[in-house]
Image: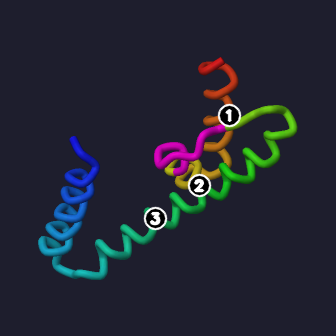
Amino acid sequence: MATGWVIALIIVGILLLTAASKSVTTPIRWMGVGVMQVVIGAILLFFTNLVGELASFHIPINPITALVAGFLRLPGLAALIVIKLWIMA
């Protein structure tokens, strides 16, 4: 599926969610919380990669890893490190 179609489907889904809810602010607030968690996860991964450069260690920053690190914070970051070291090695 082309990237344009995926973006269009996401936007239509958000609009349908907003239209179907009783309040417009609740879904927008939850989307804001989700985006904030992804940003926090990306920042955590950035600093982990910054420190990891000393040992040639790198965790890719993508939406899934940022989501895991953002929602689970340090345990999620530790899980990503364990996955990288023992499962992916």
Q: Secondary structure at mark 3?
A: helix
> Residue 3 appears at what percent x and percent y?
28, 49
Residue 49 circle label: none
Q: Residue at x 80, y 32 (%)?
A: 56
Mark 3 nearby-residue class (10 Å; few <14, some 14–19, many ≥20):
some
Q: Amino acid at mark 2?
A: Gly
Q: Earlier in the sequence, mark 3 or mark 2?
A: 3
Q: CA distance from mark 3 to mark 2?
A: 10 Å
Q: Which residue is mark 2?
A: 41
Q: Earlier in the sequence, mark 3 or mark 1?
A: 3
Color encoding of the figure: rainbow
Q: Is residue 65 magenta?
A: yes
Q: Amino acid at mark 3?
A: Val
Examine the image and state in which quarter residue 41 appears.
Answer: bottom right
The C terminus lies in which quarter of the figure?
A: top right
Q: Residue at x 70, y 37 (%)?
A: 58
Give the magenta range: 59-66
Q: CA distance from mark 3 to mark 1?
A: 23 Å
Mark 2 nearby-residue class (10 Å; few <14, some 14–19, many ≥20):
many
Q: Earlier in the sequence, mark 1 or mark 2?
A: 2
Q: Which residue is mark 1?
A: 81
Q: Which residue is mark 3?
A: 35
Identify whether 4 is placed above or below 60: below
